[in-house]
Image (cartoon, rainbow, N blue to C red):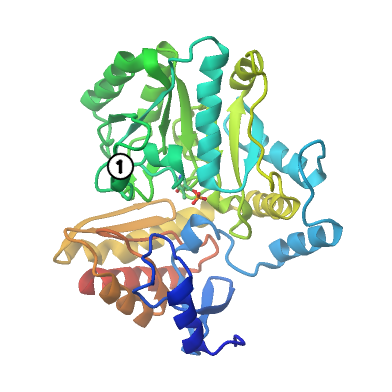
Amino acid sequence: MPDVPLNELVELDRRHVWHPYGPMPGRQEPLVVASASGVRLRLADGSGELVDGMSSWWSAIHGYNHPVLNEAVRGQLGRMSHVMFGGLTHEPAVTLAKRLVDMSPDGLEHVFLTDSGSVSVEVAVKMCLQYWRSLGRPEKRRMLTWRGGYHGDTWQPMSVCDPEGGMHELWQGVLPRQVFADAPPATYEETYADHLRELIERHADELAAVIVEPVVQGAGGMRFHSPAYLRVLREACDAHDVLLVFDEIATGFGRTGALFAADHASVTPDVMCVGKALTGGYLTLAATLCTAGVADGISRGEVPVLAHGPTFMGNPLAAAVAGASIDLLLGQDWQGEVKRIEAGLREGLAEAEELPGVRDVRVLGAIGVVQLDHPVDMAAATRATVREGVWVRPFRDLIYTMPPFITGDEDVARIARAVCAAAREG
Ligand SMILES: *Cc1c(COP(=O)(O)O)cnc(C)c1O
């Protein structure tokens, strides 16, 4: 139990603490979590536990309070929790970088560690713009993306989020103006591939890079698309001297059924961002990987360095737990677990297809989505899922889940039941 009485805690929270995409003061009462273990969040009000259907936004793939991850943090804590990365280095960061290079698509060789996904996208954009500057083509400084995307909340990432209906509409006219293709269709259509090719060719002289979320668009609308489009992008980018960036912050580390979504198409991007599940949900850490070609181009410029260096770059605690999380993932049949959850979600969410007000039900890897034909009534949907003993957090017209990979069959079924209840009542 917290030292501060619960009602006081909630009131202080409402008055002083911003929450994601929230107003100030807060209008909705957040649930207070006292602890978390396995796939369960224990509520501070004594009302019990909720099965976590969100993995704390894609990150807690091994669940909470995991003995191996706890030990990785504890062991590192006894050595050093932090040391600056300028002029110094350490084993956790170096071995993490090596693991990332080994497991990511062939050709990605260099790793820039950052403290959040958004910053890793900032670094990716900076890499691409600086690459062309270094090669004497500074006019190549725009980004192309497709609609329906989400790449984070800082400035450059916001500029490549979906410009309409997304969360960043407010900033139109202030953000850098990027080039937008239509949102990718679920299945392969040659006319859409032509649309991508045409747009890349038309803007090639001013484009530094194309940036997309491969296969699954997350917070921009939970849409899935054919991996074949990744090959179309790779070929068009190569043909027109444009770099290709994959934002795998949500999709990385097995979530879609492949280690990285790029693997579904056997495509190597020039630059790749990872984050979210990188530390198994323990600490904030992300990374931007690039090819030798990109690093070499940057290094040949008038300013031959990448001028970026966060204070907490390569944080040893975060790097140590990330290394342990990756070992834990690769040391098990993660693909089997993701397939098992996929099958459970498919079965459990099928009944939502028949519900009035449901527009679409889709499942890919350990991701399940029910899309309504109207905006979700958040209060009613949350009441329904909490009543079922499950935590999910809908947005817009979407009720969705991406459970930890350790979620057992009964809990997957329970999550699916809760999502269906939310679809009925939200
Ligand atoms: C969450 C997310 C980001 C932003 O990461 P933060 O760690 O929240 O800054 C960027 N891109 C994608 C695809 C994401 O899902």
Residue 385 vertical position relative to residue 113 in the rendered view, above or below: below
Residue 371 vertical position relative to residue 416 in the rendered view, above or below: above
* Residue at 45% over, 63% down: 54
| Image x and y of residue 423, in percent | 24, 68
* Residue at 24% over, 24% down: 190
Q: Residue furthest right?
A: 79
Whether residue 316 appears in this view of the structure is yes
* Residue at 38% over, 72% down: 26
Whether residue 106 appears in this view of the structure is no
Residue that carries the numbered disc 1 in the rendered image: 148
Q: Residue furthest top?
A: 136
| Image x and y of residue 100, in percent | 65, 39
Q: Amino acid at mark 1?
A: Gly
Q: Secondary structure at mark 1?
A: loop
Within 8 Å of ligand 1, the CB of disc 1?
Answer: no
Judged left or right of residue 359, residue 308 is: right
Q: Residue furthest left?
A: 356
Judged left or right of residue 290, residue 82 is: right
Closer-to-camera residue (424/121): 121
Picture quadrant where residue 38 is located: bottom right
Quadrant where the N terminus lies? bottom right
Quadrant where the C terminus lies? bottom left
| Image x and y of residue 283, in percent | 63, 57
* Residue at 59% over, 53% down: 333
How crowded pointer 1 is (Cα within 10 Å; few <14, some 14-19, many 20+) is rated as many
